[in-house]
Image (cartoon, grey):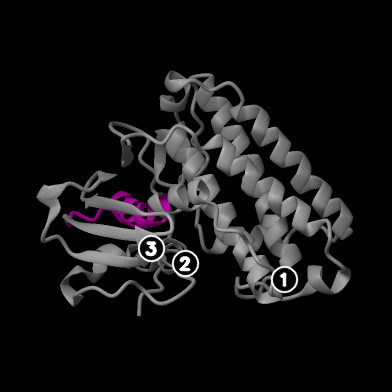
Amino acid sequence: MQLTPRYEGTPVLRFDPPVTDTAAPLLRQRRRLVATLATFDPDQWAAPSRCAGWACRDVVSHLVSVNAFWTASITAGRAGTPTRFLAGFDPVATPAQMVAGEPDVPDGERLARLTDTTESLAAALDGLDAAGWARLAEAPPGHEAISEVAAHALWDGWIHERDICRPLGIHVPAVADEVGVALRYAVSVGPALLAISGSDRTGAFRVRATQPDLDLVVEVGPDVVVRDASAGDDGLPEVEGDAVELVESFSLRSGPPDVAAADRWMVDALAIAFDQAG
C-alpha cells in the first residue's frame, strides 16, 4: 500500500485522554536495546530476526532510519512546521528497500549510529510541556499530536526489540508504561491506516488487558479514538488477554485477535492495510 496521510483537518488518530508521558518509556526502551546490542557477538548480529528476510543487524539499520525520521518530525512539529515526507510512502516495500541499500558497515558503527540517533531523539523530546505534546507532527497516518507520534515511535521500537531478542532467547522486560503505550498504538494504527485509505466503515471494539490492567475502547471510523472504557460500553465486541501478547497479536507477530467474523475487520485492520489478511 502507498500511504495517503491526512495533513488537513482533524488528526485521524487521537488518544483520549492524551498520553503525554511518553518520552521516558520511549527512551528507556531505545537505551535498553542499545545496551543489549553492545553485548552481541558477530553470530548474534547475523542471526535471523522475526522480520522476514532481515538479520538482527538489518532491524538495527531500520531503527537508525526511523529514529532519524522521528527526530526530524518532532523537531519540525515543535517549530510549528510539521513535515510532509510520507505521502506515497509504502510502509512494507520502502523500509526493505532502504535496508537493502544500506552500505555494509561494521556492526560497531551500526550500534554507534543507533546510540547517536537515540540521543538526538531524546533532545527533540526534551522539555515538552502539555502544549508542546499537543503540537502536530508527522507519522504514517498523517499529522498527529506529538504525543501520538512518540507513541508510534515507542510501539515500533518496542516490537522490533522483541523481533531481535526473542529468536535469540534474550528476555525483554515487560515494563508497564511501555506496554501500555505500545498497546494503545497497536490497537489503533491499523484502523487509522484504513481510515486514510478511504474506508468509510464504522464500529468500535473493547480491549481488556492484564499486566498491565487496561480497559480501552477503540472507536473506528473516519477518525479513530482510543479512550478508557466506561459502563456504557458493555456489549461491544471484546478482545481480552495479556497486554504483551495483545501487542504482539495486533502487530502481526501472532494470530489475529479472536472475535466474530463480522468484527474481524477492526481488529485485523493492520493486516488488511498491509494486504496480509488471511
The type of residue carrying mark 1 is Ala
Q: CA distance from mark 1 to mark 3?
A: 23 Å
Residue for badge 2: 248
Residue ID for mark 3: 270
Residue lying at 31% horizontally and 55% vertically, measured from the top left: 191
Image: magenta residue range: 185-201
Question: What kind of element bears circle 2?
Answer: helix
- Label 3 is placed on what type of residue? Leu
Residue farthest to the bottom?
278
The kind of secondary structure element at disc 1 is loop
Would you say residue 259 sits in the magenta stretch?
A: no
The kind of secondary structure the magenta stretch mainly shows is: helix
Kindly report the distance in space between the C-alpha atoms of the residues bearing marks 2 and 1: 19 Å
Residue 241 visible from this viewpoint = yes
Q: Is residue 69 above or below residue 247?
A: above
Image position, residue 208 (x, y; %): 29, 59
The C terminus lies in quadrant: bottom left
Residue 60: percent from left, percent from top: 71, 57
First reached walking from the N terminus: tag 3 or tag 2: 2
Q: Which mark is residue 194?
A: none
Kindly state the secondary structure of the residue where label 3 is placed.
helix
Mark before the other along the chain sequence, 1 or 3: 1
Q: Position of residue 220 (x, y in %)?
A: 22, 52
The answer to which image quadrant residue 172 occupies is bottom right
Disc 2 marks a residue whose amino acid type is Glu
Q: Which residue is mark 1?
A: 55
In the shown orientation, is residue 70 left or right of residue 244?
right
